[in-house]
Image: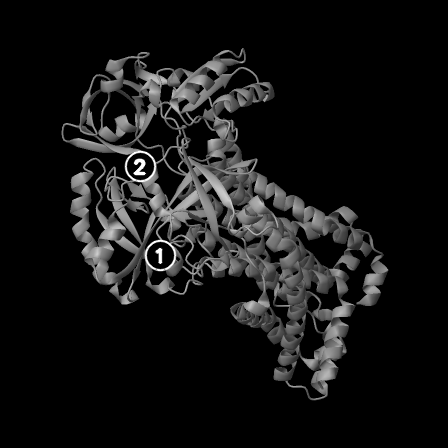
Amino acid sequence: MIKNFLTVALRNLYKQKLFAGFNILGIAMGIACCIVVYLLIHHQYNQDTFHTNAPSLFIVNHVRTTNGQPELWEPSPEPIGPALQRDLAEVKRFVRYHGTGAVVRYGSHTFREHVHLADPDFFRMFTFPIQTGSSDPISEPSGIVLSEAMARKYFGDEEAVGKQLTVLFNGDLRRTFTVTAVAAPFPNTASFSFDLLVNYQVGKDLGWQGNDWTRQVQATFIQLDTPASAGKVTKALASYVKLHNTINQQVPITSFYLDNLQDISVNAHKTRHSFAGGTSPTGIVVLGILAGLVLFMACFNFMNYTIATSTTRFKEIGVRKVLGSTRQQLIRQFIGENLITGFIALLLALLLTTTVFLPTFSRIIDFYQLRFDMLENWQLIAFLAALMAGISLLSGLYPSLYISGFNPISVLKGKQRISGTNGFVRTLLVVQFGLSMFTVSAAILTTQNAQFLRRMDVGYDQSQLMVLRANSEQSYNHLRQAALRRSEVTKVAGSQDQLGATGDNVATLEYESTKTTAETMRVSSDYIATLGLRLVEGRNFLPESPVDQDNAIIVNNALVKAMGWTSAVGKQVRLQDKPYQIVGVTQDFNYRFFFLKIAPCILKLNAPQENRVLTMKVNKADVSGLSDYMKAEWQKVMPDVPFSMTQQEDVYSGSYDESRRIKDVFTYVAMLTLMISAMGLFALVSLTIAKKTKEIGIRKVLGASSFSIANLLNREFIILITVAGVIALPLAFVAMQSLLDSVYAYHTPVTAGAFIATLLVMLLLALVTIGSQVYKIATANPVKSLQAE
């Protein structure tokens, strides 16, 4: 019986090769999309679970109120970890974790690296396996741990343990470390890792006191005796808020709180300065919805295909019923055939996932390294089994109920016709068209938005600005004088940090009873002119002016609005407990992620000896000659530091990359939905032609032209597309406006053009898809169609 069932099922697939191919391909694409999204969700919510102590590990974060809005911050005061272990019995261990830039030398090889400092309990707290070397590798300040990649980079196939590396911190502090261990490759679910790790005590040589409540470290981890103690420790943290705020009156905090290690990646999107990798749950939900839409559209096609091709099985159904088959047996047979089709589609989906979908996704969302291994992921197997059952029921139940209900006598007499399904199948097609229109309009708008961000006015002229970072006053002055000797360099300026790449330099500005927090930048007097910042009120800093250096500040428009002023110049304010006068106001300029609204910013005149970042304005696009010249000058004053000259516009690469990712996701999904819609339309055309074969033959015999026949068939689909557009496009307008508003602080306007283009794309798709079939039936010999009837 089973053999007969399989034979019939495979024979029917072979007889309808084209329909079956479309069917299998559509379901396979939907399954592949769902697999990728499942892997992403599984990866996101299994971050850091490989650490043995994960349930008891917590990071100490804090809440800060900025311009009336609470913000979650990950950096914590340097002494908070030791204080908690000293004062609370529930805290077993603490680890401070902080990264800093450095130059690492081995032999003649020199590289810029990011070195992390951590307390000695790091490897007792976290389960980062050691590949070779000591199990307690940073117990001494002279030891350094390398990742496997760093060990290969510096030593190749040689044994790294015991070798020595020279590290240059802050441009002038040179330390020699002995490699005590090499870490094993990090699990892909690690929310954080390291390249080079040394003892936190090295920070003392960098001027870190260890008990300085004004200094923030990147993260402070604590290990509790039991996860249940988190509530008690959180309450105890309140006593440290007052201590912190007494010392840090300019940057007070609202509270400290604990975040479990397994949650830091999930919460990274809403936590400022989070070092953990992660993405917003909203993004995952959107991806899940899009994958579900692709799969649902494929299932809708499955229904249409089954109904459209059922005319070829009328006699089989009639004979089976006459021979005693019950309706339930026929339903089981059709659903079983759907399972076979689904299983073939699953095999194809696994192939598509590994060869196309997962590599494409990893290329688009390049900060995730998803792994697809069914043997190591039983949850994925369970997910696919549930998915297959759902697909078979969703796509096969209605056609099975419909076809199995045919009257056997009508079937055998040739009187059975496909009827009563017009509204259902057309509704499915309208839904498909509507979903396709949504994804196409989303792809068009996100593409326009990516272009908008590229062209957006950032508040200054970022083109042809080159940036160098020196490590001392002497090297900065040397590079500045060297740059001034070049004819292509028209202006130079100094600053303490690069615009767009500043650290946490937030201060509170006070005026009478009004306060606001603002980012502060220390710049030279020629900074505004060099970058092309636009003064809208007041004046620039006076060159080399001790008075301006001690008493003057320039603010942006966002600060003026935050304070509720109409004019700011001349106002006497307090900043970091010192009086200043506002001498100028600049137009708002973007100094951080494009997804964030421009916040209040303050420019202060820097002391000449404190400038470290040199910004050069050049008058030509080709800077290769300047780069070679500045490299030679660089090596005269910083021979141990690798040369690096960057473009100012590079600071916005993160914003550009994120907008590109969003655009690419919607573009690929739009391509998939268009393909599935085209296949669904093909199925409905086949169903329509199957029902109207005799009518078309009669019309042609009575003199109807091929054009009128084509118009008869096309008209219905044009109406369906129009109905889909009337329903879907307004909804897409509202949805995309809300999506762009929620993601971007500044985005392209949502206009009718994108939706008109979407409608034209769908109409073109319909004409191309059905054109060949309509032409074939419109030009066919009507005698054959009447004979067939």
Q: Is residue 761 above or below residue 391?
A: above
Q: Is residue 702 visible?
A: no
How busy is the neighbourhood of tag 2: few (under 14 within 10 Å), some, or many (20 plus)?
A: few
| Viewer-closest of 114 and 134 | 134
Quick one: which residue is furthest to the bottom in this view?
Answer: 324
Q: How many marks?
A: 2
Residue 121 - label: 1
Mark 2 lies on residue: 207
The structure's colour scheme is one colour
The amino acid type, in three-letter code, at marker 2 is Gly
Residue, x 71% and y 65% (percent of image)? Answer: 20
The residues tagged by marks 2 and 1 sit, at their Cα atoms, a distance apart of: 22 Å
- Residue 640 on image: x %, y %: 50, 30
Residue 382 screen position, x and y as percent: 53, 71
Q: Is residue 242 shown above or below 17? A: above
Front position in the image: 118 or 330: 118
The amino acid pointed to by label 1 is: Asp
